[in-house]
Protein backbone atom coordinates (compact mmCIF):
# COMPACT_ATOMS: atom_id res chain seq x y z
CA UNK A 1 0.00 0.00 0.00
CA UNK A 2 1.14 3.54 -0.80
CA UNK A 3 2.19 5.72 2.15
CA UNK A 4 -0.31 8.57 2.56
CA UNK A 5 -0.02 8.81 6.37
CA UNK A 6 1.04 12.46 6.40
CA UNK A 7 -1.41 13.76 3.78
CA UNK A 8 -3.68 14.65 6.70
CA UNK A 9 -2.85 17.15 9.47
CA UNK A 10 -1.07 15.39 12.32
CA UNK A 11 -2.73 14.95 15.70
CA UNK A 12 0.08 13.09 17.50
CA UNK A 13 3.77 12.26 17.45
CA UNK A 14 5.17 9.61 15.09
CA UNK A 15 4.31 6.05 16.19
CA UNK A 16 4.74 2.60 14.68
CA UNK A 17 0.99 2.02 14.86
CA UNK A 18 -1.46 0.29 12.52
CA UNK A 19 -1.56 3.28 10.08
CA UNK A 20 2.25 3.32 9.72
CA UNK A 21 2.63 -0.47 9.69
CA UNK A 22 0.07 -0.88 6.90
CA UNK A 23 2.22 1.22 4.49
CA UNK A 24 5.62 0.70 6.12
CA UNK A 25 7.47 -1.10 3.32
CA UNK A 26 6.51 1.66 0.86
CA UNK A 27 7.34 4.35 3.47
CA UNK A 28 10.83 2.95 3.99
CA UNK A 29 11.58 2.49 0.29
CA UNK A 30 10.52 6.07 -0.47
CA UNK A 31 11.89 7.73 2.70
CA UNK A 32 15.31 6.12 3.12
CA UNK A 33 17.61 6.89 0.19
CA UNK A 34 19.12 3.69 -1.29
CA UNK A 35 17.31 1.56 1.29
CA UNK A 36 17.52 -1.58 -0.88
CA UNK A 37 21.22 -1.05 -1.61
CA UNK A 38 21.96 -0.50 2.10
CA UNK A 39 20.06 -3.73 2.86
CA UNK A 40 21.95 -5.65 0.14
CA UNK A 41 25.31 -4.45 1.50
CA UNK A 42 24.38 -5.27 5.13
CA UNK A 43 23.40 -8.79 4.06
CA UNK A 44 26.51 -9.37 1.95
CA UNK A 45 28.84 -8.23 4.75
CA UNK A 46 26.90 -10.31 7.27
CA UNK A 47 26.98 -13.46 5.13
CA UNK A 48 30.78 -13.34 4.98
CA UNK A 49 30.94 -13.63 8.78
CA UNK A 50 28.14 -16.12 9.36
CA UNK A 51 28.54 -19.86 9.84
CA UNK A 52 26.10 -22.76 9.93
CA UNK A 53 23.47 -22.51 12.74
CA UNK A 54 24.57 -19.03 13.89
CA UNK A 55 22.12 -16.91 15.86
CA UNK A 56 21.03 -13.64 14.22
CA UNK A 57 18.95 -10.94 15.93
CA UNK A 58 17.23 -8.05 14.16
CA UNK A 59 16.41 -5.30 16.66
CA UNK A 60 13.39 -3.34 15.44
CA UNK A 61 12.70 -5.88 12.70
CA UNK A 62 9.42 -4.17 11.64
CA UNK A 63 7.89 -6.31 8.86
CA UNK A 64 10.95 -8.66 8.84
CA UNK A 65 12.15 -7.58 5.36
CA UNK A 66 15.83 -7.79 6.31
CA UNK A 67 15.67 -11.23 7.94
CA UNK A 68 13.70 -12.60 4.98
CA UNK A 69 16.27 -11.21 2.50
CA UNK A 70 19.14 -12.53 4.66
CA UNK A 71 17.63 -15.98 4.66
CA UNK A 72 17.18 -15.88 0.85
CA UNK A 73 20.77 -14.79 0.18
CA UNK A 74 22.77 -16.64 2.81
CA UNK A 75 23.11 -20.30 1.96
CA UNK A 76 23.62 -21.40 5.59
CA UNK A 77 21.03 -22.52 8.10
CA UNK A 78 20.58 -19.60 10.52
CA UNK A 79 18.56 -19.10 13.70
CA UNK A 80 16.67 -15.89 12.94
CA UNK A 81 15.14 -13.82 15.73
CA UNK A 82 13.22 -10.60 15.08
CA UNK A 83 12.34 -8.26 17.95
CA UNK A 84 9.90 -5.37 17.85
CA UNK A 85 7.40 -3.81 20.24
CA UNK A 86 4.82 -2.96 17.58
CA UNK A 87 2.15 -5.66 17.28
CA UNK A 88 1.00 -4.09 13.99
CA UNK A 89 4.50 -4.59 12.52
CA UNK A 90 4.91 -8.11 13.87
CA UNK A 91 1.60 -9.36 12.51
CA UNK A 92 2.79 -8.30 9.02
CA UNK A 93 6.21 -9.80 9.68
CA UNK A 94 4.59 -13.11 10.56
CA UNK A 95 2.46 -13.19 7.38
CA UNK A 96 5.42 -12.23 5.17
CA UNK A 97 7.74 -14.82 6.74
CA UNK A 98 5.10 -17.51 6.19
CA UNK A 99 4.54 -16.43 2.58
CA UNK A 100 8.30 -16.63 1.87
CA UNK A 101 8.66 -19.91 3.78
CA UNK A 102 11.22 -18.42 6.18
CA UNK A 103 11.34 -19.57 9.80
CA UNK A 104 11.73 -16.53 12.09
CA UNK A 105 11.23 -16.38 15.83
CA UNK A 106 9.29 -13.11 16.22
CA UNK A 107 9.31 -11.59 19.70
CA UNK A 108 7.05 -8.77 20.82
CA UNK A 109 9.16 -7.00 23.44
CA UNK A 110 11.02 -3.86 24.32
CA UNK A 111 14.61 -4.11 23.10
CA UNK A 112 15.87 -3.44 26.65
CA UNK A 113 14.03 -6.46 28.06
CA UNK A 114 15.38 -9.19 25.77
CA UNK A 115 18.53 -11.23 26.23
CA UNK A 116 20.63 -11.57 23.06
CA UNK A 117 22.59 -14.59 24.20
CA UNK A 118 25.07 -16.28 21.84
CA UNK A 119 24.48 -13.79 19.04
CA UNK A 120 26.86 -13.94 16.09
CA UNK A 121 25.17 -11.08 14.26
CA UNK A 122 22.99 -8.30 15.59
CA UNK A 123 21.29 -6.10 13.01
CA UNK A 124 19.50 -2.86 13.72
CA UNK A 125 18.57 -0.67 10.79
CA UNK A 126 17.08 2.75 11.61
CA UNK A 127 16.00 1.69 15.11
CA UNK A 128 18.59 3.05 17.60
CA UNK A 129 17.60 6.58 16.54
CA UNK A 130 14.22 5.96 18.23
CA UNK A 131 15.83 5.00 21.57
CA UNK A 132 16.44 7.84 24.07
CA UNK A 133 20.19 8.67 24.26
CA UNK A 134 20.97 7.30 27.76
CA UNK A 135 19.02 4.11 27.03
CA UNK A 136 20.70 3.88 23.62
CA UNK A 137 24.20 3.78 25.12
CA UNK A 138 23.03 1.09 27.57
CA UNK A 139 21.49 -0.98 24.77
CA UNK A 140 24.67 -0.81 22.67
CA UNK A 141 26.70 -1.96 25.67
CA UNK A 142 24.28 -4.88 26.08
CA UNK A 143 24.65 -5.66 22.36
CA UNK A 144 28.46 -5.73 22.76
CA UNK A 145 28.26 -7.95 25.86
CA UNK A 146 25.85 -10.38 24.17
CA UNK A 147 27.85 -10.91 20.99
CA UNK A 148 30.11 -13.92 20.69
CA UNK A 149 33.80 -13.32 20.10
CA UNK A 150 34.21 -12.19 16.43
CA UNK A 151 30.51 -11.34 16.40
CA UNK A 152 29.33 -8.34 14.42
CA UNK A 153 26.87 -5.51 14.84
CA UNK A 154 25.49 -3.90 11.68
CA UNK A 155 23.32 -0.85 12.10
CA UNK A 156 21.98 2.05 10.08
CA UNK A 157 21.01 5.49 11.27
CA UNK A 158 19.82 8.85 10.06
CA UNK A 159 22.75 11.16 10.96
CA UNK A 160 23.31 14.88 11.45
CA UNK A 161 26.32 17.07 10.71
CA UNK A 162 28.13 18.94 13.49
CA UNK A 163 28.50 21.83 11.05
CA UNK A 164 25.24 23.88 10.98
CA UNK A 165 25.64 24.97 7.33
CA UNK A 166 26.28 21.45 6.10
CA UNK A 167 23.53 20.14 8.34
CA UNK A 168 20.99 22.50 6.77
CA UNK A 169 22.19 21.65 3.27
CA UNK A 170 21.91 17.94 4.05
CA UNK A 171 18.34 18.31 5.31
CA UNK A 172 17.43 20.36 2.20
CA UNK A 173 19.00 17.70 -0.02
CA UNK A 174 17.05 15.00 1.80
CA UNK A 175 13.76 16.85 1.37
CA UNK A 176 14.51 17.21 -2.37
CA UNK A 177 14.97 13.42 -2.42
CA UNK A 178 11.59 12.98 -0.72
CA UNK A 179 9.95 15.19 -3.37
CA UNK A 180 11.38 12.99 -6.13
CA UNK A 181 9.71 10.07 -4.33
CA UNK A 182 6.31 11.73 -4.67
CA UNK A 183 5.94 13.29 -1.20
CA UNK A 184 4.43 16.79 -1.14
CA UNK A 185 5.89 19.69 0.85
CA UNK A 186 2.90 19.37 3.19
CA UNK A 187 3.57 15.66 3.84
CA UNK A 188 7.28 16.37 4.39
CA UNK A 189 6.53 19.15 6.90
CA UNK A 190 3.91 17.05 8.74
CA UNK A 191 6.27 14.09 9.13
CA UNK A 192 9.13 16.35 10.21
CA UNK A 193 6.92 17.71 13.01
CA UNK A 194 5.68 14.26 14.02
CA UNK A 195 9.28 12.97 14.27
CA UNK A 196 10.48 15.93 16.37
CA UNK A 197 11.96 14.57 19.66
CA UNK A 198 10.97 11.03 18.64
CA UNK A 199 13.76 10.35 16.15
CA UNK A 200 16.98 11.64 17.75
CA UNK A 201 19.92 11.35 15.32
CA UNK A 202 23.62 11.45 16.27
CA UNK A 203 26.52 12.56 14.09
CA UNK A 204 28.56 9.84 12.39
CA UNK A 205 31.36 10.51 14.94
CA UNK A 206 28.97 10.27 17.91
CA UNK A 207 27.72 6.91 16.63
CA UNK A 208 31.29 5.62 16.32
CA UNK A 209 32.18 6.95 19.79
CA UNK A 210 29.14 5.19 21.29
CA UNK A 211 30.31 1.95 19.63
CA UNK A 212 33.89 2.35 20.93
CA UNK A 213 32.62 3.23 24.44
CA UNK A 214 30.63 -0.02 24.45
CA UNK A 215 33.87 -1.97 23.87
CA UNK A 216 34.00 -2.59 20.12
CA UNK A 217 37.53 -2.33 18.74
CA UNK A 218 36.54 -1.50 15.20
CA UNK A 219 33.71 0.35 13.46
CA UNK A 220 33.49 1.18 9.75
CA UNK A 221 30.95 3.20 7.76
CA UNK A 222 30.10 0.85 4.89
CA UNK A 223 27.51 3.09 3.25
CA UNK A 224 26.57 6.73 3.39
CA UNK A 225 24.21 8.98 1.47
CA UNK A 226 24.18 12.56 2.88
CA UNK A 227 22.32 12.03 6.19
CA UNK A 228 21.85 8.24 6.17
CA UNK A 229 24.67 5.89 7.17
CA UNK A 230 25.31 2.18 7.70
CA UNK A 231 27.98 0.96 10.12
CA UNK A 232 29.62 -2.37 10.87
CA UNK A 233 31.28 -3.00 14.24
CA UNK A 234 33.34 -6.06 15.13
CA UNK A 235 33.87 -7.61 18.56
CA UNK A 236 37.40 -9.00 18.72
C1 LIG B 1 12.48 2.42 11.36
S1 LIG B 1 11.83 0.96 11.95
C2 LIG B 1 13.06 -0.27 11.54
C3 LIG B 1 13.08 -0.70 10.10
C4 LIG B 1 13.56 -2.12 9.90
N1 LIG B 1 14.78 -2.38 10.64
C5 LIG B 1 13.78 -2.42 8.43
O1 LIG B 1 14.88 -2.22 7.91
O2 LIG B 1 12.80 -2.80 7.76
C6 LIG B 1 12.04 0.97 13.70
C7 LIG B 1 11.34 -0.22 14.38
O3 LIG B 1 11.82 -0.29 15.72
C8 LIG B 1 10.74 -0.62 16.57
N2 LIG B 1 11.08 -0.09 17.91
C9 LIG B 1 11.34 1.19 18.25
N3 LIG B 1 11.65 1.27 19.57
C10 LIG B 1 11.59 -0.01 20.06
C11 LIG B 1 11.81 -0.57 21.35
N4 LIG B 1 12.16 0.17 22.40
N5 LIG B 1 11.66 -1.91 21.49
C12 LIG B 1 11.31 -2.69 20.43
N6 LIG B 1 11.10 -2.20 19.19
C13 LIG B 1 11.23 -0.88 19.00
C14 LIG B 1 9.53 0.04 15.93
O4 LIG B 1 8.32 -0.56 16.33
C15 LIG B 1 9.83 -0.10 14.44
O5 LIG B 1 9.22 -1.24 13.88
O1 LIG C 1 10.99 10.31 6.78
C1 LIG C 1 11.92 10.68 7.49
O2 LIG C 1 12.11 11.88 7.79
C2 LIG C 1 12.88 9.71 7.99
O3 LIG C 1 13.72 10.02 8.75
C3 LIG C 1 12.76 8.31 7.52
C4 LIG C 1 12.48 7.30 8.56
C5 LIG C 1 13.73 6.79 9.29
O4 LIG C 1 14.85 7.20 9.03
O5 LIG C 1 13.55 5.95 10.15
C6 LIG C 1 11.58 7.81 9.62
C7 LIG C 1 10.51 7.11 10.05
C8 LIG C 1 10.12 5.81 9.45
O6 LIG C 1 10.51 4.83 10.34
C9 LIG C 1 10.82 5.53 8.20
C10 LIG C 1 11.92 6.21 7.82
Image: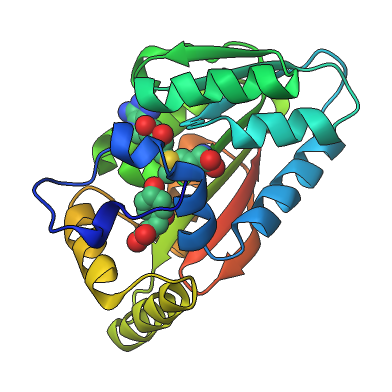
Residue at x 86% of width, y 38% of height: 48
* Viewer-side residue, 99 vs 217: 99
Residue at x 18% of width, y 57% of height: 8
* Viewer-side residue, 83 vs 164: 83
State whether residue 70 is above or below residue 156. above
> Can you say which quadrant of the picture contains the C terminus?
top right
Q: Seen from this angle, which residue lies furthest left?
A: 11
* Viewer-side residue, 139 vs 38: 38
Query: Residue 187, image x and y in percent?
Result: 27, 66
Q: Would you say 233 lies left or right of 215 here?
A: right
Query: Residue 71, image x and y in percent?
Result: 77, 27
Q: Seen from this angle, which residue lies furthest front?
A: 1
Query: Residue 44, image x and y in percent?
Result: 80, 45
State whether residue 206 is above or below residue 146. below
Query: Residue 155, image x and y in percent?
Result: 55, 44
Dividing the picture into quarters, in which one does residue 109 lie?
top left
State whether residue 81 is above or below residue 174. above
Residue at x 73% of width, y 19% of height: 102
Q: Would you say 72 lies left or right of 133 here?
A: right
Residue at x 70% of width, y 13% of height: 103
* Viewer-side residue, 107 vs 163: 107
Amino acid sequence: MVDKVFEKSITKQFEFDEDVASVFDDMLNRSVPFYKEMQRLSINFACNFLEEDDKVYDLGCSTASTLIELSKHCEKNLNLIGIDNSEAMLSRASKKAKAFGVDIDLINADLHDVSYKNAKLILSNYTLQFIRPLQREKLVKKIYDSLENKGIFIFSEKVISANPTLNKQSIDEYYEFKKTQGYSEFEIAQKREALENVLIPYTEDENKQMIKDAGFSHCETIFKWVNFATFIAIKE
